[in-house]
Each structure stands twice: as C-alpha cells, then as structure tokens.
Image (tube, grey):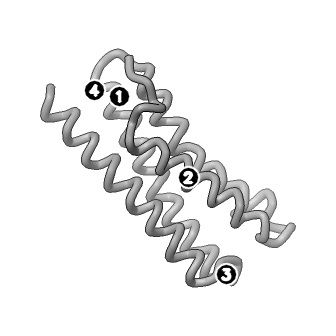
C-alpha cells in the first residue's frame, strides 16, 4: 500500500483541481450544472483515482487507476478548450491550466510505464 501524499504527481493534480475550482467561479450561472460541474468533477477525479489506486495491493491494479486518472486529465484538457471557445476562459487562463493538465498526464504516463516495467 502506498501513501498518495508522497507521490510527486499528487501535488500537481491537487493544484490543478484547486485552480479549476477557482476559475470556474467566474463561469455563467447557467453552466453551474453543466460545464462547471463537469470540469470540477473531472479535475477532482484525477486525484481521487490516484488516491484510490494507492489503496490497491498490486502494481497492475494501481496502474489501472492511474490510467483512469490520465483519462480524466485528458477530459479536463478538452473541457478547458471548450470553456475557452465559449468565452468563459481567457486564452492565458486556458493555456496555463491546459499546461498543468498536460504535465499531470505526462507524469501519470511515466509512472504507469515504471509500474509496468517493474512487473
């Protein structure tokens, strides 16, 4: 069993989620149950799945949860793009958050690769 707080990717995933929550406060009220909720859920899902995977007993199980987290990071990337194109995010905010999501996704990919090579 691993401690998710000791993983290098976790503070990055957590920071992305906090940033998403902050920026979505400015989204239109009519998006509260749409894009705002989905973007928040997808960003939080990254950390949720990393933490849940840490509670698994095998590297294969852990890697599966990291893959799910990676999928959520990709979802966040798309939702940020959509928010930018809808005019809810500035280009600068989009670029900053998208770069964070990409960094998390790359870290997860490298971690998954290391787990698979250990097996």
Q: Indicate the position of residue 6 as horizontal and vertical percent values.
A: 42, 32
Q: Residues within 10 Å of mark 1 (few under 14, many from 20)?
A: many
Label at residue 15? 2
Which residue bears the numbered disc 1? Answer: 62
Q: Indicate the position of residue 15 as horizontal and vertical percent values.
A: 56, 52
Task: Tell me if label 3 and label 1 are in contact, CB under 8 Å.
Answer: no
Q: Residues within 10 Å of mark 3 (few under 14, many from 20)?
A: few
| Lower position in the chain sequence, tag 2 or tag 3 | 2
Task: Tell me if label 1 and label 2 are in contact, CB under 8 Å.
Answer: no
Spatial CA span between label 4 and label 3 = 39 Å
| Lower position in the chain sequence, tag 1 or tag 2 | 2
Spatial CA span between label 3 and label 1 = 36 Å
Q: Nearer the viewer, mark 1 or mark 2?
A: 2
Task: Tell me if label 2 and label 3 are in contact, CB under 8 Å.
Answer: no
Spatial CA span between label 2 and label 3 = 24 Å
Q: Secondary structure at mark 4?
A: helix
Q: Indicate the position of residue 40 as horizontal and vertical percent values.
A: 66, 53
Taking 105 as reference, is 50 above or below it?
above
* Residue ID at (44%, 68%): 99
């Amino acid at each position: 069993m691993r401690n998710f707080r000791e993983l290098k990717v976790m503070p990055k995933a957590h920071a992305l989620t906090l940033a998403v929550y902050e920026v979505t406060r400015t989204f239109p009220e009519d998006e509260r149950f749409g894009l705002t909720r989905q973007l928040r859920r997808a960003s939080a899902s990254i950390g949720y799945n990393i933490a849940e995977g840490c509670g698994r007993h095998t590297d294969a199980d852990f890697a599966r949860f990291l893959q799910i987290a990676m999928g959520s990071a990709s979802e966040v990337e798309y939702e940020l793009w959509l928010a930018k194109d809808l005019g809810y995010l500035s280009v600068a905010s989009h670029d900053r958050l998208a770069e964070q999501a990409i960094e998390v996704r790359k870290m997860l990919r490298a971690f998954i690769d290391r787990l698979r090579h250990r097996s």
